[in-house]
């Protein structure tokens, strides 16, 4: 079964195993539960102003972001320690696993 990234949370309900691929390369192969467990205590959220996104992207390992009705953004960040006092610890989701795997596969630009 092939499931697109836009319904990645459905994988938790439908699949015993999962794989994340990028360009035909397998980036991760595990169960949904193991994949999210590996990111426990490393996902943090913060609400920011839309104009502050670029600066936060430079400072933090931002995995994803989404708009709020008041035009602010929720950002989800991966960090082994609390990035700053205004971040809140969050439970990892499969979306985090997906975006973390893709970020790990990005080439490093010096």
Image: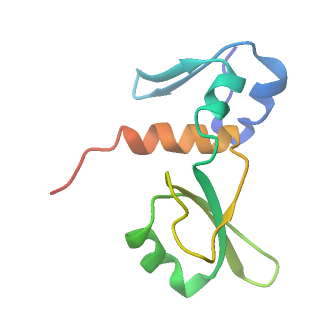
For image coordinates 74% across by 12% down, the residue present is 16
Q: Would you say 3 lies left or right of 22 here?
A: right
- In the image, residue 29 lies at what x, y percent? 54, 17
- In the image, residue 40 lies at what x, y percent? 64, 41
- In the image, residue 36 lies at what x, y percent? 66, 34
Q: Would you say 74 lies left or right of 85 here?
A: right
For image coordinates 45% across by 40% down, the residue present is 102
Residue reaching furthest left? Answer: 110
For image coordinates 80% across by 31% down, the residue present is 10
15 up-or-down from 73: above or below = above
Give the quadrant of the C terminus.
bottom left
Q: Would you say 32 lies left or right of 110 here?
A: right
- Within the image, what quadrant is residue 51 found in? bottom right
Numbered disc total: 0
41 up-or-down from 65: above or below = above
55 up-or-down from 7: above or below = below
The scheme the figure's colours follow is: rainbow
For image coordinates 76% across by 36% down, the residue present is 9
- In the image, residue 47 lies at what x, y percent? 68, 76
Give the quadrant of the N terminus.
top right
Instruction: Identify which residue, 91 or 51, lies in the foreground.
Output: 91
Instruction: Identify which residue, 41 or 49, lies in the foreground.
Output: 41
Instruction: Identify which residue, 75 or 25, lies in the foreground.
Output: 75
């Amino acid at each position: 079964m092939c499931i697109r990234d836009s319904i990645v949370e459905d994988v938790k309900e439908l699949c015993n195993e999962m794989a994340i691929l990028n360009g035909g390369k397998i980036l991760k192969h595990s169960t949904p539960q193991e994949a999210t467990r590996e990111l426990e205590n490393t996902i943090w959220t913060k609400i920011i102003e839309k104009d502050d996104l670029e600066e936060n992207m430079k400072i933090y390992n931002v995995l994803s972001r989404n708009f709020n009705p008041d035009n602010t953004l929720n950002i989800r960040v991966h960090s082994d320690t609390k990035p700053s006092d205004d971040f809140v610890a969050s439970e990892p989701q499969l979306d985090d696993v997906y975006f973390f795997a893709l970020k790990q596969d990005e080439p490093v630009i010096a």
